[in-house]
Image (spheres, rainbow, N blue to C red):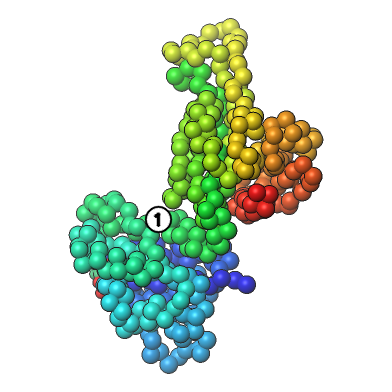
């Protein structure tokens, strides 16, 4: 069944950003309802939210033109999450004092859903001790908060008070809707390509975007795990709430993994680590000439082999295999030779799978099973892999 998310919009300049959030959540297949404060109407028209959410926007508690299944109480009951974006100082103050004098505050007070506030206001308003006390009080009552960012505010002041990014807000909503099946688990994940410098200008790398490893890290965090991510050369937004170690070369990745591999419940090696690096790094730019250039390469350390040999007994080890032919055969050999518990094999030649894509087509190889999965989002695949590893633990 579709989960219901109620978005409360209050009268701040950042109200327009809630439109994007509603649109994104609808695309993620949630049933989204919007409640606006009267002052929010000064900033955005309800028609925008109605068109995006496909539902009437609720503003007036005493509106006689209503359906019985969408009064403040039924919306409060229906909601899985109630998130206020943006949350003004005024509404935060009212909620902290138990005031319920409009549709938005009354529904917020009446719901037992996960409650989230996303404050956005002028810096001096935000740092005002009364506002801070109100936020603290709401937190003590179990309300979650997406912290505002620092930056140039609409009032031209620079400081804290800018609405958190829609991505951060969405992540908090999705996090709060995910069952904490990995609570108490420690998970180490590697992601992305490594980068081997040839000289100060050039390097050797591969096409890995890091999306699979980041999806695993994001999903493990949503499932309640304590996540350490070793990220290679990636251009992806940082995931809040996890420990991320940024590295470049295969050697740096190996050092980071050696530092963190002990005492983990799960280790997932989703990074595309270079098998070779240059024999001699040139400290000055190699000048071009008309002759051919031959680069002497040497093997890098095999991180997965190291983990297979040295990991704790209880740690479930997952390797990834990206191949262009004989995928299952190579994956089965890798499983044995690297002492892994499972290998996630993907074929780089398949459409919408492998490097760069948000989707993947994987086959999970264990010692007694070969399980081919269809096309799915990397986040869904991450969820599947993590549950499988939990089962094996
Ligand atoms: C142009 C303008 C921008 C405003 N921006 C904010 C804001 O970003 N954050 C905030 O807390 N209040 C802001 N306010 C003040 C609120 O609109 C005011 O406190 C109002 O009472 C909030 O009502 P509500 O919480 O019921 O929506 C702004 C007011 C104006 C006129």
| Left or right position of 386 against 221 | right
Instruction: Compare residues 305 and 292 and report the one nearer the observer.
Output: 305
Q: How far across and down, in percent of the image, does residue 75 sit?
A: 48, 80
Residue density around tag 1, few if under 14, some if 14–19, many if 20 or more, within 10 Å: some
Image quarter hosting the N terminus: bottom right
Question: Is residue 377 in view?
Answer: no
Instruction: Compare residues 155 and 95 and report the one nearer the observer.
Output: 95
Ligand number 1: quarter of image: bottom left
Name the residue at the bottom extreme.
64
Q: Is residue 137 above or below residue 171?
A: below
Q: Mark 1 — residue? A: 165
Q: How far across and down, in percent of the image, does residue 168 sit?
A: 43, 56
Q: How far across and down, in percent of the image, does residue 57 sit?
A: 44, 78
Instruction: Compare residues 309 and 222 and report the one nearer the observer.
Output: 309
Residue positioned 54% across, 60% down in the render: 180
Residue positioned 28% across, 58% down in the render: 161
């Amino acid at each position: 069944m579709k989960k219901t998310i109620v978005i409360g919009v209050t009268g701040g300049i950042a109200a327009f950003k809630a439109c994007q959030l509603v649109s994104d959540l609808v695309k993620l297949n949630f049933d989204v309802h919007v409640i606006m404060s009267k002052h929010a109407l000064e900033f955005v028209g309800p028609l925008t939210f109605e068109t995006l959410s496909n539902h009437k926007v609720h503003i007036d508690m005493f509106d006689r033109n209503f359906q019985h299944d969408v009064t403040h109480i039924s919306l409060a009951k229906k909601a899985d999450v109630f998130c206020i974006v943006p949350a003004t100082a005024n509404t935060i103050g009212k909620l902290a004092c138990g005031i319920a004098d409009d549709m938005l505050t009354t529904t917020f007070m009446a719901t037992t859903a996960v409650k989230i506030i996303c404050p956005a206001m002028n810096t001096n308003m935000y740092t005002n001790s009364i506002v801070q006390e109100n936020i603290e009080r709401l937190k003590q009552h179990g309300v979650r908060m997406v912290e505002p960012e620092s930056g140039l505010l609409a009032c031209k002041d620079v400081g804290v008070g800018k609405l958190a990014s829609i991505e951060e807000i969405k992540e908090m909503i999705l996090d709060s809707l995910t069952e904490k099946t990995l609570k108490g688990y420690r998970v180490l994940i590697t992601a992305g390509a490594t980068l081997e410098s040839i000289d100060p200008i050039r390097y050797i790398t591969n096409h890995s975007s890091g999306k699979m490893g980041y999806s695993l890290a994001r999903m493990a965090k949503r499932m309640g795990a304590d996540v350490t991510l070793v990220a290679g050369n990636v251009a992806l937004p940082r995931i809040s709430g996890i420990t991320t170690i940024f590295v470049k070369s295969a050697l740096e990745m190996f050092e980071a993994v050696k530092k963190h591999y002990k005492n983990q419940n799960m280790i997932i090696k989703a990074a595309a680590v270079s098998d070779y690096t240059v024999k001699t790094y040139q400290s000055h730019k190699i000048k071009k000439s008309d002759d051919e250039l031959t680069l002497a390469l040497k093997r890098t350390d095999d991180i997965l082999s190291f983990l297979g040999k040295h990991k704790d007994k209880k740690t479930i080890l997952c390797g990834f295999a990206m191949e262009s032919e004989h995928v299952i055969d190579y994956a089965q050999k890798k499983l044995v030779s690297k002492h892994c518990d499972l290998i996630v094999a993907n074929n780089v030649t398949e459409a919408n799978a492998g490097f760069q894509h948000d989707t993947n087509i994987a086959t999970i190889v264990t010692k007694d099973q070969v399980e081919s999965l269809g096309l799915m989002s990397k986040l869904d695949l991450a969820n599947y892999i993590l549950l499988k590893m939990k089962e094996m633990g």
